[in-house]
Image (cartoon, grey):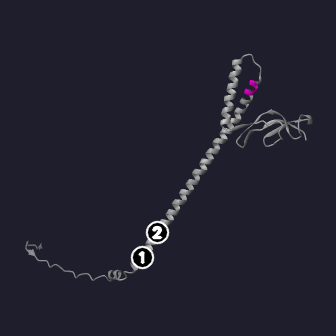
Amino acid sequence: MSFDQNNQPEEILEETTAEAPVDDGALDAEAPAEEQPEQENDALKEAQAKADEYLNMAQRVQADFENFRRRTKATRAEAFEDGAREFIKQLLPVVDNLERATAQETCDESLMTGVKLVYKQLMDALEKRGVTVIDRPNEKFDPNLENAVMQGTADEGEPGTVCAVLQKGYKMGDFVLRHAMVKVVAE
């Protein structure tokens, strides 16, 4: 209600609106009920295809990572072995000097005993690491293991054989650390 200028109540007629007509589209949505399951099936199939795609992608990534880890482990092991071989190569002149020291005559037996013990300990450590000596006198010359630095005469042995080892060689597994320097009988 509202008031007029005299503060008298004024009646206002409320307009009533007619109900809105029913939307025909709403009826149409209910009518093709069998189309909805097909749309849901299509959406489900699409979602399943995406899930399969993501699963395949995740499996590929996991396989790639496993391959990467395996390669990294192999590379790390190979690098470790390379470092060990290089370090052992640097120790070989020390081994040579200890061999020369033990071959010398000395009047101080305790010193000689100490040098021999150090030499034996070093050789045991190298042996544990897989290092073997290349020392093949009177065997056929093998250029993969030995360097011929001198030529011997026929009376020193069979032709093509090692008649003297001038410096021992060493190998670690199948890898030659240092070729033996040898004297070979001429053929």
Dot 2, crowdedness within 10 Å: few (<14), some or many (≥20)? few
> The C terminus appears in which quarter of the rendering?
top right
Residue drawn at point x = 77 percent, y = 38 percent: 179
Closest to the camera, between mark 2 and mark 1, is 2
Which residue, given by chain and number where applicable, does mark 2 sit on?
48
Secondary structure category for the residue under label 2: helix
Dot 1, crowdedness within 10 Å: few (<14), some or many (≥20)? few
18 above or below 88? below
Which residue, given by chain and number where applicable, does mark 1 sit on?
39
Percent position of residue 74, x then y: 62, 48
Q: Quadrant of residue 113?
A: top right
Residue drawn at point x = 43 percent, y = 72 percent: 43
What secondary structure is the magenta-colored segment mainly? helix
The kind of residue on which mark 2 rests is Gln
Secondary structure category for the residue under label 1: helix
85 above or below 57? above
Marks 2 and 1, Cα distance to the nearest angstrom? 14 Å
Judged left or right of residue 71, residue 29 is: left
Percent position of residue 166, x then y: 81, 32
Residue drawn at point x = 61 percent, y = 45 percent: 76
Asked if residue 36 is among those painted magenta in the image, a careful observer would answer: no
Residue drawn at point x = 45 percent, y = 74 percent: 42
Boundaries of the magenta span: 98-102
Q: Which residue is nearer to you in this view: 7 or 123? A: 123
Q: Quadrant of residue 44?
A: bottom left
- Which residue, as the protein is rendered here, is positioned at the far right? 154
Judged left or right of residue 28, residue 108 is: right
> The N terminus appears in which quarter of the rendering?
bottom left
Q: Quadrant of residue 22?
A: bottom left
Q: Earlier in the sequence, mark 2 or mark 1?
A: 1
The kind of residue on which mark 1 rests is Gln
